[in-house]
Image (cartoon, grey):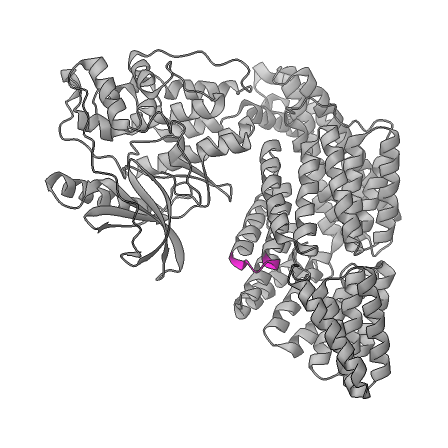
Amino acid sequence: MPVTGTPTPTIDAPALADEAAVAARVRARLFGGDATADEGRPADDGHLPARIGRFEVRALVGRGAMGRVLRAYDPDLDREVAIKILADVAASGADDEEEAARLRREAKVLARLSHPNVVAVHEVGTFEGSVYVAMEFVEGATLGDWLRTHQPPVDRIVDALVQAGEGLAAAHAAGIVHRDFKPANVLVGDDGRVRVVDFGLAHRRSPHTLPPETGGPASADALAMAGTPAFMAPERLRGQPADEAADQFAFGVTAYFALFGTYPHEGDDPFSRAVAIVENRRRPVPEGTPAVPRHVRRVVERCLAHAPGDRYPDMAAVVTDLRRDPLRTWRRLGVSAVLAAATGLAAYLAAPNEDLAATCAGAAEIVAPLQATAQALFDASGEGWQTTASRSVARHLEALGKAHVDACIAERTEMVSAEQAAHTDACLRLAMAESRALLDIVPSLAPHRTPFVAAVAADLTPPEGCLHPRADGAAPFDPRGLEGAVADLVRARLAARSGAYREAEHLARRVVERSRDAEAAGLEARARYVLGAALERLGRRDDAEQELRLAMVAAERAGDDLARARASSYLVYVVGRIRGDVDQALDLAHQTRSLLDAVDADDAVRADFENNLGAVLARAGRLDEAAAAHERAHRLRLQHFGPTHPATLASEAAMAIVDSSRGRHDQAIRALEALHARAVADLGPDDPATLSIAGNLATALARAGRTRRAADTLSELVRRTEAALGSQAPMLPTWIYNLATARAKMGDHDQARRLYVRGLRLRRAQGHDPASEVRWLSALAKTEVALGDLEGARRHLDEALATALRHAAAPRRTAEIHRQLADVERRRGAPANVVFHHEQAAAEIDRALARPRDSSDTPMGR
């Protein structure tokens, strides 16, 4: 039974309802004798205890032949756990005591194991005469359910098998044999991590098992308790004890099922399949299954060898061979050829592969002119944005060169179809066109825009994605004849990144029209994505949502599932964080995750999704889940970009802000101080990422009540931002707003008013954002009331109210304006107006009961 958030059936759920009977029938047919199996203990009545030891029982996760799995809470360590009560292992009786002692010994070994691909075992104890095991609670699905639900591509399946193999190998190294490895005992967590569960926890070693040289049958009890027949090695079905080789066979059956969608041996039920295993009757690979790399097939075949001696010596060797991808070997060879040619060391290459290596190494030369241009534009040893831009562009161009080498090798060794080769060629043309456009733009950029080049480089088409197979067969997006539109789209991305949202909107709309004229749906999807981003920043949230949905439609029309997934990911943020419909956003997030799995999106795209999800969860007050999402984003960005990339640093900042929201102020401040120091050292003090971290630090200080230090930090931040990025910098108005709020809290209302007025003017210059404008006018009116300027306060509140009503602002925001107006009218001595505004505020509150809360003042996430 899986240790997951929802109960899931095993692959053989109906047929394996009575494993004891199945195993006994196998024994009877193969060896003769009694087919009656020990029926074990009677089924429990479903009663849930309130506590098991120190654990507080929360819910029943599932039940099976092994017993029940409960979701529980450990108050001592403040964590959720899964508790498995083993129906077939009692705490008394000679055999049962021996079995319970074995469980405790193995649980202690597993607890010390602490491997990322093994579900952690916390404790083994007894409860009401039965043995229980408390272990890590994993939110996710069994491998079987994950395969059915997500239908992942082959390389994702292989990655999951590698992780499961790592867990099994670690257990073997610690002296633990699993005894029942199968898809139901492999969990794919929501965090993407694969874990193996139930190492020998429900299967006793029978003292009645006959030694292998006798050729006799195992007892009914031994067969019934040994494992799942369809996954058992032939020697185990003959009665031999479980060992590492038998686990390896079960791994082979699991891998075969995951890759080909069926079992490797003949038969339509567990009984007939078990007989086929013993008789070594294999079925052919079914037609119409996805292309599985030859090296993976060879690994699975060896794991399924009938004789234990013909299998791998251990699971570590299995994992090593699964990881040994020939394409990656060729890639290393191709890169080595480039290095060899550059240094005159042609003899470095192995003789049999010289021709192919030399030919495909030359494929990377197409990128050389771009690399030369980039080197001339960026001083790699310079300060600030030049260093960051140089790293980002160099990383992208290096990946582009490697992708050309890989594509050449794959085509010449016939590792891809003609259709896939055409897709790869078109995709690489697009990546080249985008790179040329970016480098063409840089020399004419205004100084305040140049620091955003690094972020735009990270937004370009990932070259490694061009090598992924397309299952839909749709025509790829070929940029030939559309180079001007591609260049405009790069300019639009740069404008949006640097705060020129109106310019970004104009350019993106132009690309949309051009793509529709050319019937280039793939380009249209990308343009609508950028347009949606610009509109979101302009505060036109309904328009932004519409464009992102249209981007998904265009991407679907183009057969570009990755573009569709990216638009869906951004939509999660707009619907949940901006519009406030958290439930709809989380439903959309579930669909988005499935899309990302289906297209095998790279780590950068997955990190963006986790980042957006974290922002939505934080908005909903689900801070533990928000922290977990941001941690996943950070882990993905760390392995994709490295520790000094702005995106990686942004994830660390988001994690600290969540800690601040949890009330862990000192921890958040320390983390942000350390992060800011690293950013200054790696990126320079005026890099946009460094400045953004300083803004997060000011937010954490303000939340901790350290208002004066927050104000000082913001003052320096505003000064640096204007000097480095100009008045159009995207976050400058927000930082001025926060500085004004800090000054008002310190009682400096005159300075606060000047800051609110200035920041509002800058915000309007960037673009009209009704929600932000209402918030700004409301804050400005508060300072005017404090200064005694009631007429000014009433004028600005009337303007805020008109804007709120015109743009259908959230009822809570409108109610707050009415309350402020009521206070102003009271101070002015107008009781009738006071009553009117209180009544309007009450009416808005009634409306608000049916709607989610408005988004918070402090931007977080994007």
Residues 303 and 402: in front is: 303
* Any part of residue 159 in sight: no
Q: In the depicted view, which residue is nearer to us: 299 or 564?
A: 564
Residue 417, position as x, y percentages in the image: 65, 16
Percent x, y of residue 127 = 23, 51
Residue at the spot 30% in from the left edge and 19% down from the top edge: 271
The residue sitting at the left extreme is: 94
Residue found 72% across the figure and 67% down from its top: 813
Quadrant where the image shows the N terminus:
top left
Whether 112 is among the magenta residues is no
Task: Specify the quadrant of the image occupied by residue 696.
Answer: bottom right
- State the count of labels: 0
Whether 678 is drawn above or below 402: the answer is: below
Relative to 813, is 17 above or below? above
Quarter of the image where one finds residue 801: bottom right
Q: Say whether residue 823 is visible.
A: yes
Residue 621 falls within the magenta-colored stretch = yes
Where does residue 827 sit, x and y in percent of width and height?
78, 87
Image quarter in which the C terminus is found? bottom right
Along the horizontal axis of the image, is 388 left or right of 502?
left
Where residue 614 appears, x then y in whole percent? 59, 53
**Residue at 58% across / 73% down in the picture?**
704
700 above or below 572? below
Start-end of magenta stretch: 618-624
| Residue sitting nearer the eye, 722 or 212 | 212
Depicted 63 relative to depicted 299: above or below: below
